[in-house]
Amino acid sequence: MEALRVLELYSGIGGMHYALKESGISAQVVAAVDINTTANKIYKHNFPDTPLWNKTIEGIPLDDFNKLCFDMILMSPPCQPFTRLGLQGDVADSRTKSFLFVLDLLPRLCKLPDYILMENVKGFESSSARDRLVQTLMDCGYTFQEFMISPTSVGIPNSRLRYFLIAKICAENSCIQTGAKGCVFSHVPRSPLPSLSSVLRSDSPCTGQPAEEKNSAHVLYKRETPSDAQRKTNQNKNPSVQQIQDFLQPQMNVDMERYLLQPKTLLRYASILDIVQPQSRRSVCFTKGYGRYVEGTGSVLQCCMDHEVSSVFTNLDQLSEQEKLQKLLKLNLRYFTPREVANLMGFPQSFCFPEDISIIQQYRALGNSLNILVVATLLQLMCSEHFGHTEGEEQFSVS
């Protein structure tokens, strides 16, 4: 089969490009587009032969897109307008402008791309931007499927729940221009990979108890309730998910001392740390603030297993500051290295950072990227000859 020509929008550090390689699909990225200087430097370092356009998407003329003659669009638009912790400005947020431009551009292309894959944060599925995306795809004659997926669905011990959409054009519409209509399906076709489908559709964020229940629940240690502890225990017993130790760097290859949590960090934030061990089968989402901020930015690793976390934190608040610190230091807690975070996100060993990219910049770049194995799996599904068949259809709504 002739290699697919792929346009990579919001290319970042190349997560979509790596996913394309991982999928085994015969394809060539004919252009990558991003305006982040640091991300572009990392991308160019790893994909020196790929044309990289340091331009705003809405600043690229239609003719330039048409000249690329691409068969597939991969994109991960800015998530800030949709994240639950943000202002949720949706289509009114200026950072959504380029995505709306893409939706306006799509029906005006000389040739509609055969495939589209998009990733965004949880929250996008209930946005007006999502409604516009779906309407555009329907108007252009695409069949599509939507997912909420976390890497645990493909055996990775990391929670990173994200919205995904995969779309495929009906053959008779591939050369129809403005106003293309026809083979339109607002439903979701049955997946050709039942085992994968059943796992992905059942995946959901592990939120534990409702906030109001947690406030009144008995706290075992740190800020964990019995429900929190049981949830983590259950996650760690899931044999379909790999252990953290499978993703760690060999100790002799890096100076781990530089990643140890500092005393002032331990004293101030100990009660909110998400602590995992090498044998754990879980970790929380790594964000762009990892290494700079503590709360909600990612898990930390317990390197000394001589002490139980529960024993260290029991009655900790009753101790003096010095006594408290001595107990906490027994756990030998450290941050995951950027290489280890990259491993948990599915980046191959060939991926690396330029020497002048600081550790904080590395964390930030990774936190803005995506899980490669999840995307690779969806690419295989999207390009399957079964995807888009109308037989055995079933309704599905994003939740």
Image: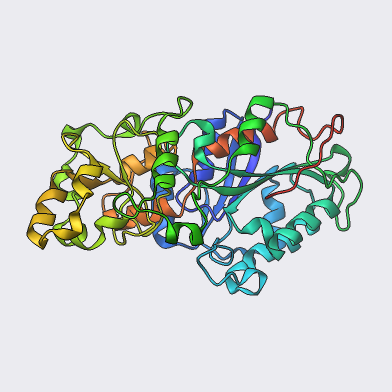
Q: Is residue 11 left or right of residue 390?
A: left
Q: Is residue 285 left or right of residue 134?
A: left
Q: Is residue 246 left or right of residue 80?
A: left
Above or below 137: residue 99: below
Q: Which residue is found at the position 58% from the left and 54% from the top?
A: 122
Instruction: Using the image as rendered, state which of residue 304 and residue 192 is in the foreground.
Output: 304
Q: Which residue is found at the position 64% from the left and 25% from the top?
A: 195
Instruction: Using the image as rendered, state which of residue 315 and residue 167 is in the foreground.
Output: 315
Instruction: Using the image as rendered, state which of residue 36 and residue 117 is in the foreground.
Output: 117
Q: Quadrant of residue 148?
A: top right
Above or below 203: residue 360: below
Q: Which residue is found at the position 16% from the left and 50% from the top?
A: 328
Q: Position of residue 199 (x, y in %)?
A: 61, 32
Q: Position of residue 79 (x, y in %)?
A: 55, 61
Q: Quadrant of residue 63?
A: bottom right
Asked if one can make out residue 121 in the rendered structure from this viewpoint, the answer is yes
Q: Position of residue 247 (x, y in %)?
A: 34, 33
Point out the image quarter for the N terminus: top right
Q: Which residue is found at the position 89% from the left and 43% from the top?
A: 183
Q: Position of residue 362 (x, y in %)?
A: 33, 52
Asked if one can make out residue 18 in the rendered structure from this viewpoint, the answer is no
* Colour logic: rainbow
Q: Residue farthest to the right?
A: 182
Q: Is residue 10 left or right of residue 252?
A: right
Above or below 19: residue 215: below
Give the mark count: 0
Q: Quadrant of residue 321?
A: bottom left
